Amino acid sequence: MTSPRRYHITTFGCQMNKADSERMAGILETMGFESVAEPDAADLILYNTCTIRDNAEQKVYSYLGRQAARKREQPNLTLVIAGCVAQQEGEQLLQRVPELDLVMGPQHANRLQDLLEQVFNGNQVVATEAIQVMEDITQPRRDSQVTAWVNVIYGCNERCTYCVVPNVRGIEQSRTPAAIRTEIVALSQQGYKEVTLLGQNIDAYGRDLPGVTPEGRYQQTLTDLLYYIHDVPGIERIRFATSHPRYFTERLIRACAELPKVCEHFHIPFQSGDNAILKAMGRGYTQEKYRRIIDTIRQVMPEAAISADAIVGFPGETEEQFENTLKLTETIGFDLLNTAAYSPRPGTPAALWSDQVSEVVKRDRLQRLNHLVSVKAAERSQRYQGQVAEVLVEDQNPKNPTQVMGRTRGNRLTFFPGDITQLRGCLVPVQITEVRAFSLTGEPVLMLSGAPR
């Protein structure tokens, strides 16, 4: 009896890439492959790549170089590069790394079996052409037993001057509400308790679907989708990401307040607190509009957690303009802020501008912003001290096997004593005894709902 073929996937980048990797893992297991933790033990290695910043891209090439050397010793090793670097570089990757067997862009994730069959027939394959994304009929191999990603819209039609995503992920393509609900029903039947709806620009959901209402708005919006899926039995929590301030509506906020399963957590990138920089970025809103969105959320849902993304050192950014980002961060007080120094990306307008900010200045600004982020997050965490928070248990604390871990509705990672075999997938009220900037510790009060998995 021959042993099963083994695969290893390394995923870089965003939640969309993580969801794509889960789908591709499901395809590989349908084909008879088994997952292994160590790449050197695998017969097939797949790198699902990100090109949003240069350091992530360079890390891919480093990993790929090591496996290409291994393939020269073991010709039966199959090397696959997927995702955004694959889409951006295409056939040039074969010139750089001739040992590659398959180069495939993110739109082709659901075609992995077909593409691999071509490889196993002796072909070196490049799949980066624009296509209509196939409806997801695969069974993902999900990393969690409790929470699941659900793609609702692929691609992006925005043209932010720093961002390569529209070039590599293609135009916006929304899935139908019926297909999304069918996937969520199946997840519920498998015992999942939480779903996160995903889109590069999730507020654009439905714009490409046919029809408008008598009031002149799109027939299907993200808000409509939340109402449509909300009553799926067994699903306890619903999240969504990533939002765009240009399209974020008060109607969406009020739906989140009205629908009890939708968590009180909004991820809305602002990128810069300076209007001139926002205009140069092509973001389509002002810092005043962004503040109005946050003010409305806090009026309607005072306990909501707010997270965001910000970029420092965009071309032309002055010290005064950077300080406007600090001011916005200070006055809003984010629960979490993902920060990054600007990284010029091939094929984007900003990469060609002459007024690039030096790496020294970018590093200094990033350090200063990160310090402020930690201070404000710690302040925000104080509201949990002594409170009882509902925690959905996801896993054992890897650093302390006597504890389990999960997240509050506001997405704060929380640790408390417990047995994962009894508590995985359960909603547990936890009295918070210790607060930190980005996580909490507490003691369980009693069981609310959910059954052991």
Image: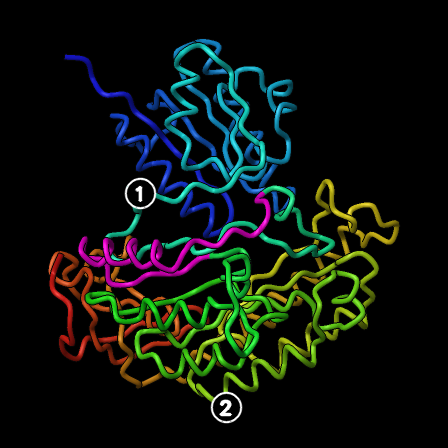
The N terminus, quarter of image = top left
Q: Which residue is mark 1?
A: 140
Instruction: Assign a secondary structure to mark 1.
Output: loop
Q: Which residues are magenta?
A: 169-198
- Asked if one can make out residue 74 in the rendered structure from this viewpoint, the answer is no
Task: Give the farthest residue toward the front.
Answer: 214
- Where residue 294 appears, x then y in whole percent? 56, 81
- Vertical position of residue 334 compared to residue 239: above or below: below
- Vertical position of residue 70 compared to residue 51: above or below: above
First in sequence, mark 1 or 2: give its number: 1
- Looking at the image, residue 233 sits to the left or right of residue 136; the answer is left
Task: Give the farthest residue toward the right.
Answer: 354
- Where residue 278 appears, x then y in whole percent? 74, 67
- Looking at the image, residue 244 sits to the left or right of residue 324; the answer is left
Cα gap from disc 1 to disc 2, whole angstroms:
39 Å
411 and 200: which one is in front? 200
- Looking at the image, residue 345 sits to the left or right of residue 204; the answer is right
Membership of 448 in magenta stretch: no
Residue at 17% x, 80% y is: 445
Residue at 26% x, 71% y is: 231
> Looking at the picture, which amino acid does disc 1 mark?
Pro
The C terminus, quarter of image = bottom left
Residue at 28% x, 21% y is: 5
Q: Which residue is mark 2?
A: 299
